[in-house]
Image (cartoon, helix red, strand yellow):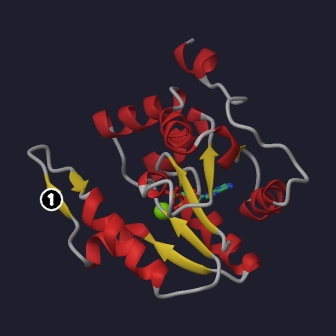
Amino acid sequence: MRAVIAVTGTPGTGKTAVSKLLAKRLNAELLDLNRLIIEKRFYHVDREGVKVAHLKPLRQEVSKRLRNTRGPVVIDGLLSHLLGKKLITRVVVLRTHPKVLKRRLMRRGYSGKKLQDNLESEALDIILWEAVKEHGEKKVIEIDTTGKRPSRVVNMVLKALKGKLSLRPGRISWLEEFYK
Ligand SMILES: Nc1ncnc2c1ncn2[C@@H]1O[C@H](COP(=O)(O)OP(=O)(O)O)[C@@H](O)[C@H]1O
Ligand SMILES: [Mg+2]
């Protein structure tokens, strides 16, 4: 079975940086969900001005693209773990300590509620939880990227994909520090 690896995580955790490198190392095609959502206009803007992606057409489009290719694929995007069990062979959930994440997101111009919501989501393991719920523990790899360069993260992910390193989900918790 060919590998279709979803790289997910809260915004700013390094999905794009890691996906690019991982795709290179695996000689895989890179599928950028953000770009696809914009290009195909699979979203609407809600009352608060937030872009809301449309999962169903996105799923259909990804499925179509996968049918038209054969080799391994890396999918970059914070909805990649929600594309459906059948399409995805492994899910990589990137985690970053909320303090570090806060700096990264502020640099990106996040502030107020948007910033707080994302930091809380990271502190509460939301994406990890969604990924495990959808795919089961065995398909999910969770990695703390705090203080690690993307190249090191990718090396660890490659090892985990080969079964040579255990990155089982559920070992990372930012709660104590976040709510102190
Ligand atoms: N492991 C890392 N260590 C330090 N900075 C990183 C790391 N991964 C990504 N970054 C930086 O953090 C920011 C967010 O990374 P990005 O890959 O765009 O995240 P995402 O795609 O998850 O939103 C970028 O400025 C990137 O250069
Ligand atoms: Mg990105």
Identify the residue at horizontal 56%, vertical 38% (top origin).
132
Q: Nearer the viewer, residue 151 or 26?
A: 26
Rendering coords of residue 82 (x, y %): 43, 51
The residue beneath circle 1 is 44
Identify the residue at horizontal 65%, vertical 78% (top origin).
72
Q: Residues within 10 Å of mark 1 (few under 14, many from 20)?
A: few
Q: Quadrant of ligand 1?
A: bottom right
Q: Nearer the viewer, residue 1 or 42?
A: 1
In this view, 70 is above or below 154? below
Rendering coords of residue 87 (x, y %): 50, 64
Identify the residue at horizontal 76%, vertical 62% (top origin).
154
Rendering coords of residue 26 (x, y %): 74, 77
Q: Is mark 1 within 8 Å of ligand 2?
A: no
Q: Is residue 140 visible?
A: no
Name which residue type carries label 1: His
* In this rendering, position of residue 155 left or right of residue 48: right
In this view, 124 is above or below 139? above
Q: Nearer the viewer, residue 2 or 123?
A: 2
Secondary structure, mark 1, is strand
Q: Quadrant of the N terminus?
A: bottom right
